[in-house]
Image: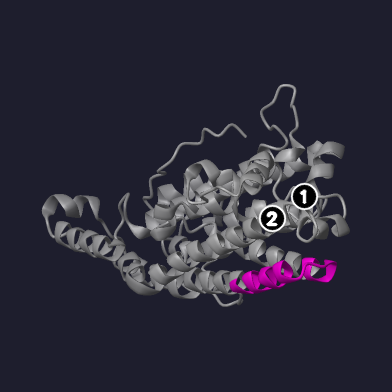
């Protein structure tokens, strides 16, 4: 059904652009937006989904092996696969468009802080539906963080939860269900990109509020602003608090406690790579927002705007490298360096939301009201 809907949307779009009124809303400049969209789709987005799905399949296999015979070695292998998925997710998180937007992939995959009491209630009752929005904060990668790292104090005790605990069968079932839902949602989006949606995405190459370049650029900025700057740092440090009431329990990967920096840096780099049109997991670059700005010769402060933007990305990554691996403890010991990192990320957002989108005729489609 969704493919039929997409096709109808494309037909309506193409027909409407033939009318004089529609053409006023569907403008084009000298830059080849179709080439940009093709690069994004074929060399960045689809390959990132391919790796994400492949890693989820590996995660499912190691999860099944652990469930069949829980021990510490299998637990460690499962954790490694979980972290690989979580790291790749930092790229996939940006693309909240098409089926990902329809299914709310980002919300169901990485909403934190986790409601651990709800997870335990679901496990205890054995009666839950992870497709319901009421269970958004009880599933996804944060739920796996809890199930693999946080349900007991030691690795041996975690293994007991899945082996000799009175509720071991339910713990196993919940672990399996969380992994299965992550995989099925990802495959649904991957399949759609490789099917109908890729063509729709590339064909919608005009400049308008509903055009692909505009929508994905807004997604990129939103992800950097809300998902990276706010959720990973701003909210845990209570950025606007007077005085701040830090909330280290709201950090990403709370229970693993030594990978929050790794995930933050991966998220910033994913945003920079998309801006530069960098092929996923390679060093090659194609048409991009960077090349778009360069073709139009957009400058800021006597420099190419693309150079200014990349300088700010590099500064944010360099500052993030100074942070503790464990944000939970780090925020409590030195909030200031986290605030500085947040500000470095904010400096990227400022130039993206003002200079860049203005130069490219892109209108922001959301409000900055999350209070980080």
Going by the image, does 321 lie left or right of 272? right
Residue 20, position as x, y percentages in the image: 12, 53
Query: What residue is disc 2 on?
Result: 171
What is the secondary structure assignment of the residue under circle 1? loop
The image position of residue 183, as x and y in percent, is 54, 66
The residue that appears at 40% across and 74% down in the rendered structure is: 194
Do callouts 1 and 2 mark residues in contact (Cβ within 8 Å)? yes
Q: Residue 307: image x %, image y %?
A: 58, 59
Residue tagged 1? 151
Query: Which residue is more in the foreground, 141 or 251?
Result: 141
Which one is closest to the eye, mark 1 or mark 2?
A: 2
Q: Decide whether the magenta segment is chiefly helix, strand or loop.
A: helix
Q: Is residue 335 magenta?
A: no
Q: Nearer the viewer, residue 178 or 372?
A: 178
Q: Which residue is the extreme one toward the top?
A: 242
Identify the magenta region: 57-75
The answer to whether residue 184 of the structure is visible from this angle is yes
């Amino acid at each position: 059904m969704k493919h039929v809907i997409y096709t109808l949307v494309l037909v309506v779009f193409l027909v409407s652009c033939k009318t004089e009124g529609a053409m006023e809303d569907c403008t084009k400049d000298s830059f080849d937006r179709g080439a940009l969209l093709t690069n994004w789709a074929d060399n960045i987005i689809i390959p990132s989904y391919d790796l994400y799905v492949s890693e989820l399949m590996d995660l499912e296999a190691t999860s099944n092996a652990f469930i069949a015979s829980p021990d510490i070695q299998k637990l460690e292998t499962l954790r490694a696969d979980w972290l690989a998925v979580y790291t790749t997710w930092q790229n996939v998180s940006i693309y909240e468009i098409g089926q990902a937007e329809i299914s709310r992939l980002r919300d169901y995959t990485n909403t934190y802080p986790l409601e651990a009491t709800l997870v335990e209630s679901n496990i205890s009752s054995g009666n839950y539906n992870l497709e319901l929005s009421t269970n958004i904060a009880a599933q996804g990668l944060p739920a796996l963080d809890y199930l693999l790292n946080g349900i007991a104090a030691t690795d041996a005790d975690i293994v007991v939860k899945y082996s000799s605990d009175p509720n071991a069968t339910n713990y196993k079932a919940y672990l399996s269900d969380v992994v299965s839902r992550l995989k099925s949602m990802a495959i649904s989006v991957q399949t759609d990109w490789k099917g109908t949606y890729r063509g729709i995405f590339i064909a919608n190459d005009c400049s308008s509020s509903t055009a692909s370049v505009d929508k994905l650029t807004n997604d990129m900025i939103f992800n950097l602003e809300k998902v990276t700057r706010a959720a990973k740092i701003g909210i845990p440090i209570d950025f606007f608090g007077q005085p701040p009431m830090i909330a280290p329990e709201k950090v990403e990967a709370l229970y693993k406690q030594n990978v929050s920096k790794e995930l933050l840096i991966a998220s910033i780099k994913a945003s920079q790579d998309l801006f530069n049109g960098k092929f996923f997991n390679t060093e090659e670059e194609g048409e991009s927002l960077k090349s778009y700005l360069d073709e139009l010769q957009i400058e800021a402060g006597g420099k190419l705007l693309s150079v200014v933007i990349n300088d700010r990305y590099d500064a944010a990554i360099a500052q993030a490298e100074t942070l503790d691996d464990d944000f939970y403890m780090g925020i409590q010991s030195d909030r200031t360096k986290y605030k500085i990192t947040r500000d470095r990320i904010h400096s990227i957002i400022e130039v993206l939301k003002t200079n860049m989108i203005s130069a490219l005729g892109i209108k922001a489609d959301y409000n900055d009201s999350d209070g980080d």
